[in-house]
Image: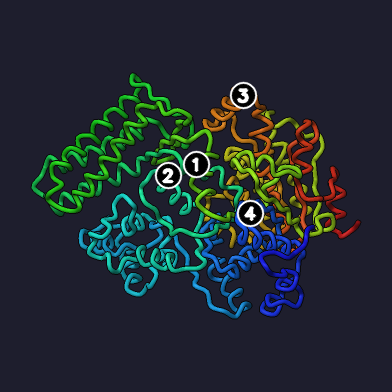
Amino acid sequence: MSGVTGGGQDWSVLLGETGALARALPQFRAREQQQAMAAQVAHTLRDGGVALIEAGTGTGKTFAYLLPAMLSGRKVLVSTGSKALQDQILEKDIPLLLRAMGKPLRVSRLKGRANYLCRHRLQRFSAEGVAPALVAPLARVADWAGRTREGDVSELTSVPEDSPIWPLVTSTRDNCPGSECPEYGRCHVIEARRQAQEAEILVVNHHLLFSDLALKANGMGDLLPRVDAMVLDEAHQVLDLAGRYFGQHLSSHQLWDWGRDSRAETLAEAGDDEGLLAAAAQVETQTTAWRTVLGPGDERGSWALNPDSAEGSAFARLRQAVAELGQALNAAAARGKGLEQCAARGVVLLATVDFFAAHNAPNMVFWQEKKSRTVQLHATPLDVAAPLQRHLLEPVESVILTSATLRVGDSFASTERALGLTAVSTLTAASPFDYARQSLLYLPPLMPEPGHPSYTRACLDAAAPVIEASGGRTFFLFTSHRALQEAAVSLPQRLSFPILVQGSMPRPRLLDRFRSLGNAVLLGAASFWEGVDVQGEALSCVIIDKLPFANPSDPILRARTEQCQAEGGEPFRELQIPQAVIALRQGVGRLIRSEMDRGVLMLCDPRLRSKGYGRIFLDSLPPMRRVSSLDAIHAFWRGEA
């Protein structure tokens, strides 16, 4: 490992056993890896450029980038993978570092506008009334509105975050009247953005950052102030987010909201215009009809509009309804600001509908995502490297990309290639945990191939004794909801431990329940593979059913595969393996979260040993001792060598 001096600081002193942080935090442990990472961050902040830093679990990477950022004298934006991590940084980490440093610093957080109460919309729906089921939550929001300073909806824990009241009392870029709003002078979003402009350290999440980049890319203004440097934590998410935000989108929610808002503004400003009311209602009706004709269930697939199909006819009727409401709004726009704003929204929505109807943008993948009540259309760029360079990397002097999972094997090459990075500095700050002592990797013998009809049953048969030996205390992670549901039916009949199933309650409550029970088995799919931190004995075993390869029918993967083949590449090795390795490493990372943790990792997939590429996955995992017998697991839990 290289030295620990960077940015004019000796980080072995600042982050050492007798440094300021050790004095402020009694449980602090000095780590060479943390010091090396801090030196690399400080060097990049001072000299500019791009740094890729993989920091293993337990490195203390948050402090390793926050402290150099706070001491740099530069305006630094820190972007996190979740609002939960954003809150942790603001409420715990930065206050502690400020006490350790002993000097003031202007720090601010900024979230997307949907996270802030809109006083104007609250007043409007309080006056107009809401559905009976929303009367009580509206009253709670109104009571809280008189007390809150920041207007952050997460403050009001008595109203669930997925309550249908929130879209009514928060704003979107589409329905915000801007400076014309009667509450503009007291707007929580405007105040949060003002504080962001003044901050020396600004903390956001990736969704807001990429929303801002997409607005700038389309020449539609910005959400975030200019900064000297950026730190992107959980940077393994960047490729997917760039694909999502640098494309085009149309959702049934957008259309419903526009129709509903147009009807409400008509009643407020042009109640005698029956034609306008009818046109607004028709948009809502045709949007519902379009979603209905797609059939029940959740599904994602290619978007290819056939004008002669039922779906094509429904979309054509929707397009006609959008055009007619747009014309009616244009004719009535002079009667009020609300109608004028709805007319402007209509112009954008009609152009988006026509874009998807035409379906001829080069280098874009057109696909649809159908959920139980909604549908979204997407046009995703095949290559995100160019817009990332233009809108993220080039305008900012210093960019640090960090995560626990950026390498495949010992190489950053796949991440560099996917993001179009050149002349980049790299650092691996390995986890300080003693995986050989703290953990065991169990590869069960005689497993069928994953495509076999009885594969999930074989996984459950092999996993049951491992869960028994571990006293419950298990995350069982699945690559499909079908397999998860099969396990949810089967395991309660096999095991005496509490079985918790993803989707049975909100994720935070499910995790709290898992921790408090102490011997539970949690069955989870994609959302439990990362961003979940359960330290201590409550989580002592992680079981993964399959290598997390993306579904080959996924429209984005299929299009990128065809592009890679056309360029003479090997899609499986260049696209699918790196993506699956990163996802697997995220899931494995749930097991050992502190120096005191011990645990068993079970990987059911026989391809780890039967396929040549299995070695790439195994070489990318922490250095755990590998076994293939249940006796070894019993011995591990007995504390035997």
Relative to 244, does residue 368 appear above or below in the rendering?
above
Mark 4, mark 1: which one is toward the viewer? 1
Q: Residues within 10 Å of mark 4 (few under 14, many from 20)?
A: many
Instruction: Give the residue pinned by disc 2.
Output: 217
- Residue under pointer 3: 565
Residue 387 - label: 1
**Residue on which the image places disc 4:** 402
Q: Secondary structure at mark 3?
A: helix
Q: Nearer the viewer, residue 376 or 20?
A: 20
Instruction: Answer with mark 1 or mark 3, whichever residue precedes in sequence.
Output: 1
- Residues at marks 1 and 3, CA–CA distance in whole angstroms: 22 Å
Q: Is residue 476 visible?
A: no
Tell which circle, 4 or 3, labels the residue nearer the N-terminal end.
4
Placement of the C terminus among the 4 image quadrants? bottom right
Going by the numbered disc 1, the residue's amino acid type is Pro
Dot placed on the residue nearer the N-terminal end, 4 or 1: 1
Q: Quadrant of residue 346?
A: top left
Residue 66 x, y percent position in the rendering:
60, 66
Q: Are marks 2 and 1 in contact (CB under 8 Å)?
A: yes
Q: Residue at x 36, y 51 (%)?
A: 221
Question: For the residues marked 4 and 3, what is the alpha-carbon distance in whole angstroms?
Answer: 30 Å
In this picture, is 458 found above or below 345? Answer: above
Asked where in the image residue 232 lies, by quadrant, the reply is: bottom right
